[in-house]
Image: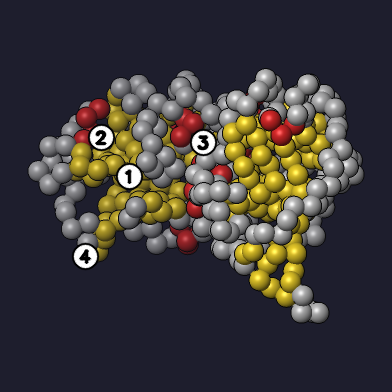
Amino acid sequence: MFTKITIPFLVLTLSLVSCVEMKNQAMFDAPADQEIPEGIKNFYALNVFEGKLNGEHWFSVPPEIESKECLDITSTYFITSELDENGEAIVEPAMRWTWDKQAGDCDWMGMGLGWDGWSGKDLSQITDKAAIQLKVRSVKGDLKSLPLAACLEDYGDNQVWIGFHPQVIENGIIKEDEWSNVTLPLAEFEWDIAQDIDMSNIKQMLVQFEAAGDLYVKEINVIPFKGGFTKRIEIPYANQLDLTIDGKTDETLWSQAQAIEFASYEVKSLSDDENFYFSLSFDSEQNIINPFTDGGMWNGDGFEIAFTSNHELGKKRVFMSSTDQHFIINLANKRAWDYRNSSLIEGIQVAESKNNETYQFEIKVPLSSLDLDAFTPNVKYQMEFAVGKSSADGTKREMQYKWNSEGKDGFYAKPALWGEMTLNPLN
């Protein structure tokens, strides 16, 4: 492990004057200006860094090279436009990260934050309920990416990592003139390659620096954050459900199902030990068109569903497993095609109703029609939905709209692009 280095307390000239106003966070569940609670599910060590460097922080200094030629971390201050109760300007402490890996013989460049007095921190109960959030701003010019990675390290030197890719940056940009959030959901760390880490005994957070950059960091906190970046559907489940497949979805059970929306489409789902049930509703001025009777159904109006029946598989897979399913419902002739087995699926029921320009489909998929057993409640599976829209002449697909993988190609082959699905028992 790297040697802990005490950082000298350096006061920079108070030359930056700004009014620090936090904006509501658009990308994530947790807003930018949220108040840090007392605890998250009995975890109370929420403050990783707050303004001032101390003995809980260290950074690497390459041998025989001055730190500023590779990595330099110093204390700085900001004067806000707000005044305290005595009428004096409020001063906010921060730290400045300046790094350039190409400047010299720079090997590993990183910083450690021990927080909470270097005690072992138990994050095991909040890995799906929290994120680490940094409040940052650019020293010069707006930034759309950061060449950084973060990791949590336990007292056995085991590590789990996450990159600072654009998805973690609030609104996709770090500005020079105001503070922005960088949010790292614990659920998005690379758990698939960190099987041995002990999340009940975390020693520190590490930040690894690549390329070059110059950044102010004011705060680092553990905040409430449900799940990760992938979208989630929670499906009500019972041993047996009594539903009439008539396209109307007017049973009370459907009112308890979570509605997910993408583009102009709404999807709901229910499940029991023998079936999945889906509803699909949308508005369209065009009649439903899909003349295809085989694997070409994707060219017309169709509802595609993909999921895995093995919750133990890695969530970042870029290949299909034998336990992955992908099929399409032809919304015109109500037939279903299995893309994994290249065959029609027998036993699926599809009913349609229409009110003016609003279409409503209700679908029953027996698990036996896919040679599947009952799913396990309260564990995470992967699932994806897509809807294809036919051209007006019915010869080809005009558009395809996807739930979790919108804007990305290849969901039919890459489960890493799917969302998450959990069966929640009905009370």
Q: Do the residues labelled 2 and 4 touch (CB within 8 Å)?
A: no
What residue sits right under mark 2 in the picture? 298
Q: How far apart are the alpha carbons under marks 4 and 3? A: 35 Å
Residue 321's spot in the image, x, y percent? Answer: 48, 21
- The residue that disc 3 covers is 382
Residue drawn 21% across the image and 35% down it = 299
Decide: is 205 above or below 196. below
Q: Is mark 4 on a helix, strand or loop?
A: loop
Task: Assign a secondary structure to mark 2.
Answer: helix
Decide: is 64 above or below 329.
above
Q: Counting residues from the N terminus, which is met first, the one under dot 2 or under dot 4?
A: 2
Question: Which of the marked residues, 3 or 2, is nearer the chain's N terminus?
Answer: 2
Q: Quote the CA–CA distance across marks 1 and 2.
A: 12 Å
* Residue type marked 2: Trp
Residue position for label 4: 356
Q: Is residue 90 left or right of residue 231?
A: right
Point 25% across, 34% down: residue: 298
From the image, state whether disc 1 or disc 4 is nearer to you. Answer: 1
**Disc 1 residue type?**
Tyr
Label 1: few (<14), some or many (≥20) within 10 Å? Answer: some
Give how far apart the Cα atoms at labels 3 and 2 are.
Answer: 21 Å
For mark 3, does the 10 Å Cα neighbourhood hold few (<14), some (14 to 19), or many (20 or more) residues? many
- Residue in front for this viewpoint, 278 or 171: 171
- Where residue 96 sits: x, y (%)? 70, 46
282 and 115: which is toward the camera: 115
Gap in Å between the C-alphas at discs 2 and 4?
26 Å
Residues at marks 1 and 2 touching, judged by CB atoms closer than 8 Å: no
Measuring from the top left, give residue 156's x and y in whole percent.
Answer: 84, 25
- The mark nearer the N terminus, 3 or 1, is 3
Q: What residue type is labelled 3?
A: Gln
Q: Which of 17 and 410 is in front in this view?
A: 17
